[in-house]
């Protein structure tokens, strides 16, 4: 089964990678709803629920927080969507890093 995130991890699909280690990759989201939209992704293919109930979440979250602080020094949000009703569009687990602008009181 094709997974674009797995292809990015394997460097077979293009992406603007901002961080990478043995376990996690962080790259720019192709969506541009706010100035900074990054995805912190485990290199092992897993579902959202698996990520959040495993030890892997600590590494993915740490990379997301580090990149958020670096790219959005005035503040950022970490966000995960679970399922289509929550607008999850990729089956490979990931954490969004969003910021670069005032996100509003209720955004």
Image: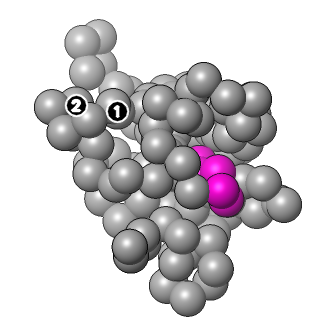
Count neighbours of disc 2 (C-alpha within 10 A) and say few if under 14, some if 14 to 19, many if 20 or more.
few
Residue 18 or residue 23, whichever sits in front: 23
Disc nearer the start of the sequence (2/1) = 1
Q: Which mark is residue 27?
A: none
Q: Residue at x 29, y 11 (%)?
A: 105
Q: CA distance from mark 2 to mark 1?
A: 5 Å
Residue 76 or residue 58, whichever sits in front: 58
Which residue position holds label 2?
A: 86
Q: Residue at x 22, y 31 (%)?
A: 86
Q: Is residue 106 above or below residue 92?
A: above
Q: Is residue 63 above or below residue 31?
A: above
What span is in magenta?
A: 40-44
The percent position of residue 89, horizontal first and vertical second, equals 26, 51
Q: Which mark is residue 81?
A: 1
Residue 69 visible within the image: no
Q: Residue at x 38, y 73 (%)?
A: 1
Count neighbours of disc 1 (C-alpha within 10 A) and say few if under 14, some if 14 to 19, many if 20 or more.
some
Question: Magenta includes 42?
Answer: yes
Residue at the outermost left position: 85
Residue 46 visible within the image: yes
SS at circle 1: loop
Check the image and tell me how it is coloured. Answer: one colour
Residue at the outermost top position: 105
The percent position of residue 68, horizontal first and vertical second, equals 62, 38
Residue at the outermost right position: 22
The percent position of residue 10, horizontal first and vertical second, equals 64, 80
Q: Residue at x 35, y 65 (%)?
A: 30
Question: Magenta includes 106?
Answer: no
């Amino acid at each position: 089964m094709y997974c674009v995130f797995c292809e990015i991890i394997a460097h077979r699909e293009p992406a603007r990678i901002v961080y990478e280690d043995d376990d996690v990759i962080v790259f720019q989201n192709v969506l541009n709803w706010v100035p900074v939209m990054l995805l912190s992704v485990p290199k092992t293919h897993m579902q959202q629920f698996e990520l959040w109930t495993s030890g892997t979440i600590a590494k993915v979250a740490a990379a997301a927080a580090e990149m958020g602080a670096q790219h959005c020094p005035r503040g950022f949000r970490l966000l995960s969507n679970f399922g289509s009703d929550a607008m999850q569009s990729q089956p490979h687990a990931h954490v969004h890093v969003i910021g670069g602008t005032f996100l509003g009181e209720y955004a």
